[in-house]
Image (tube, rainbow, N blue to C red):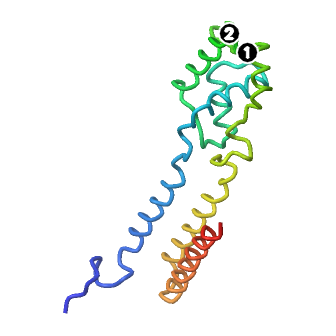
């Protein structure tokens, strides 16, 4: 009688390979920035908010946004520079050459715009999709996956069975968290 296991005759065969695939899938889901594209107005609000702090050139703005979102959002030059140009056209931003770079500053009208709009920023704690709110989740998920991999590599058959039960319970409990709210 031929067995139905495609990996060599028993359920644990090629466990390392399958586990590595699962880890890679988990990692890719968490490492892909969830907010790579900002919603309409977020680039504008972020630029205004940063320039309210101090004058900057375009790449400083990009780096500052990336740092404040823990890398979850890095706007492209193709979104920041047109925004800066639009803000200049609207009279909210002025430019000055310094060491071969354009330095952008808020004008008085720009400061009024920031105050009037209460320019929110994507890195503020109340923002729904920013890095700080979810920073612990990917780390915990990867640590859990690494622990499962370790049990798979060096655990006995009984330990692997117990680990599977723990992971299945964790999955059910995570879904129950979502069902609560």
Q: Residue under circle 1?
A: 105
Helix or strand or loop: what does disc 1 sit on?
strand
| Relative depth, front residue between 61 and 181 | 181
Image position of 108 with respect to 132: above or below: above
Quadrant of the rendered image containing residue 176: bottom right
In space, the residues marked 2 and 1 are separated at their CA atoms by 6 Å
For the C terminus, the quadrant is bottom right
| Relative depth, front residue between 117 and 139 | 117
Residue 136, x across and y down, in percent = 67, 58
Residue 120, x across and y down, in percent = 72, 35
Q: What mark, if any, has residue 95 been given in the picture? A: 2
Q: Residue at x 40, y 74 (%)?
A: 15
Q: Are marks 2 and 1 in contact (CB under 8 Å)?
A: yes
Residue 126, x across and y down, in percent = 73, 47
| Relative depth, front residue between 173 and 151 | 173
Residue 72, x across and y down, in percent = 60, 43
Left or right? Give the position of 45 relative to 20.
Answer: right
Q: Residue at x 66, y 18 (%)?
A: 57
Helix or strand or loop: what does disc 2 sit on?
strand
Image position of 66 with respect to 91: above or below: below
Left or right? Give the position of 5 relative to 137.
Answer: left
């Amino acid at each position: 009688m031929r067995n139905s296991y495609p990996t060599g005759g028993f359920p644990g065969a090629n466990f390392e390979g399958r586990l590595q695939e699962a880890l890679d899938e988990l990692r890719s889901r968490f490492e892909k920035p969830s907010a790579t594209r900002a919603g309409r107005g977020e680039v504008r609000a972020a630029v205004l908010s940063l320039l309210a702090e101090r004058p900057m050139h375009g790449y400083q703005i990009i780096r500052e946004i990336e740092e404040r979102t823990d890398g979850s959002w890095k706007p492209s030059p193709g979104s920041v520079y047109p925004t800066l140009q639009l803000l200049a056209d609207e009279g909210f931003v002025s430019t000055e050459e310094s060491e071969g770079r354009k330095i952008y500053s808020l004008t008085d009208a720009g400061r009024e715009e920031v105050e009037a709009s209460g320019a929110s920023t994507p890195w503020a704690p109340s923002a729904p999709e920013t890095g700080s709110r979810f920073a612990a989740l990917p780390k915990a998920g990867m640590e859990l996956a690494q622990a499962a991999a370790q049990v798979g590599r060096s655990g006995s058959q009984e330990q692997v069975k117990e680990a599977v039960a723990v992971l299945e319970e964790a999955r059910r409990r995570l879904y129950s968290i979502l069902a609560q709210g």
